[in-house]
Image (cartoon, helix red, strand yellow):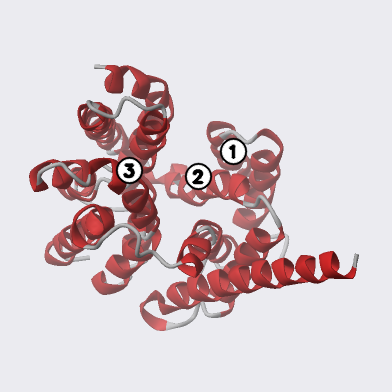
């Protein structure tokens, strides 16, 4: 129950995204059932938005799935950080927790896990995850119903890059992150003419590589400064 | 896109997503994630988002268009300013959409 309660404030952020997702998906020409299928089976907000953008651009299925994989690699971090608390649970419990391990569920559960008393932590994590899942299904469905009624002349699909802009800004916390975004964006524009949207995958790899290299160089520079002082 | 390709994406997307979440909970021991991999993951969101946004704004019709007549570019720049200043998703969408409608109507 506590898991459900602690997830409620986050629903304020999740429900609007579910609505936008549903509306954009049908706006991009995805049939309602498949749009709901993405929410039901994939259950990963940002990856679903990216998939809609790529499907609208007629990218091949393999490129879409590959992009979903790259974007969701961060879940491996979540998996690694909650694993120590659940390592003695039976397989079906760990399988269920993994299914519900989204950004928001992790955010809430990881705080709770650090506050000791981990005896009931799996029930807490299950509660918070299921709350989120149910809210995501319901808000996607409402978005799909509403989105199907919006006329095409409204250019609703433009809300997708705008949503991404709003998500991008908070990630630009330091120079390496800005470098990753700048390189990713410029490479994507330069390679925009490549078939199958392959430019996107190249751009992501280039951006991440430059960001990482920038951070390593900064770290080694500050080491040298310390030695000199 | 065909219905078959769509459901292939849904099934494939489900499998790869679940695999990332299962990874250290079920598939491999949790102390095996190397440090450079942890550091690199932080750069995935900015790289991906910028790589999606920038072509949408600069190549709306498939070819590079950096002129003032590209209404999506102008509306996008305006929305970027709003996103940076107010850090609010709804406000960003509203500003960008209103700018797009207004600029398209003026043209």
Q: Nearer the viewer, residue A3 or A204?
A: A3
Q: Are marks 1 and 3 on the same chain?
A: no
- Whether tag 3 and tag 2 are in contact, CB under 8 A, the answer is no
Q: Are marks 3 and 2 on the same chain?
A: yes
Q: Which mark identifies residue A163?
A: 2
Which chain's residue wears label 2? A
Instruction: Say which quarter of the image contains residue A109.
Output: top left
Q: Secondary structure at mark 3?
A: loop
Q: Which residue is mark 3?
A: A102
Q: Residues within 10 Å of mark 3 (few under 14, many from 20)?
A: many
Which chain's residue wears label 3? A
Residue depicted at x 22% and y 60%: B19
Residue depicted at x 52% and y 58%: B42
Q: Is any atom of residue A50 visible in this view?
A: yes
Spatial distance from mark 1 to mark 3, Cα to Cα? 24 Å
Spatial distance from mark 3 to mark 2, Cα to Cα? 19 Å
Q: Is any atom of residue B104 visible in this view?
A: no
- Whether tag 1 and tag 3 are in contact, CB under 8 A, the answer is no
Q: Secondary structure at mark 1?
A: helix
Spatial distance from mark 2 to mark 1, Cα to Cα? 7 Å
- Image-based side of B81 in relation to B87, left or right: right
Q: Which residue is mark 1?
A: B92
- Image-based side of B36 in relation to B99, left or right: left
- Whether tag 2 and tag 1 are in contact, CB under 8 A, the answer is yes
> Is the residue A219 above or below the residue B93 in the image?
below
Q: Position of residue A90 (x, y in %)?
A: 10, 44
Q: Nearer the viewer, residue B56 or A79?
A: A79
- Which of the image's four quarters has the C terminus of chain A? bottom right
Which chain's residue wears label 1? B
Q: Position of residue B74 (x, y in %)?
A: 68, 53
Labels 1, 3: front one: 3
Q: Secondary structure at mark 2?
A: helix
């Amino acid at each position: 129950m506590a898991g459900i309660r602690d997830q409620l404030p986050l629903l304020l952020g999740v429900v609007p995204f579910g609505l936008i997702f549903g509306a954009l998906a049908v706006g991009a020409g995805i049939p309602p059932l498949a749009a709901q299928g993405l929410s039901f089976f994939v259950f990963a907000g940002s990856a679903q938005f990216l998939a809609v953008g790529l499907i609208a651009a007629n990218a091949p299925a393999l490129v879409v799935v590959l992009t979903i994989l790259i974007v969701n690699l961060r879940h491996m971090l979540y998996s690694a950080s909650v694993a120590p608390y659940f390592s003695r649970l039976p397989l079906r419990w760990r399988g269920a927790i993994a299914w519900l391990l989204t950004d928001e569920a992790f955010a809430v559960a990881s705080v709770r896990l650090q506050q000791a008393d981990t005896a009931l932590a799996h029930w807490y994590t299950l509660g918070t995850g299921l709350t989120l899942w149910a809210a995501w299904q319901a808000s996607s469905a409402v978005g799909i119903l509403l989105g199907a009624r919006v006329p095409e002349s409204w250019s609703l699909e433009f809300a997708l890059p705008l949503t991404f802009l709003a998500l991008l800004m908070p990630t630009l916390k330091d120079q390496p992150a800005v470098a990753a975004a700048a390189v990713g964006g410029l490479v994507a524009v330069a390679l925009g003419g490549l078939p199958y949207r392959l430019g996107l995958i190249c751009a992501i790899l280039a951006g991440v590589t430059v960001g990482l290299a920038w951070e390593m160089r900064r770290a080694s520079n500050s080491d040298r400064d310390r030695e000199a002082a | 896109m065909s219905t078959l390709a769509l459901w292939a994406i849904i099934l494939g997307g489900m499998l790869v997503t679940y695999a990332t979440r299962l990874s250290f909970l079920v598939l491999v021991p949790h102390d095996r994630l190397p440090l450079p991999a942890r550091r690199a993951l932080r750069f995935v969101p900015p790289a991906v988002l910028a790589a999606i946004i920038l072509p949408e704004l600069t190549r709306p019709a498939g070819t590079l268009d950096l002129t003032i007549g590209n209404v999506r570019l102008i509306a996008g720049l305006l929305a970027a300013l709003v996103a940076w200043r107010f850090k609010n998703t709804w406000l960003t969408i509203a500003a960008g959409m209103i700018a797009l409608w207004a600029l398209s109507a003026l043209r």
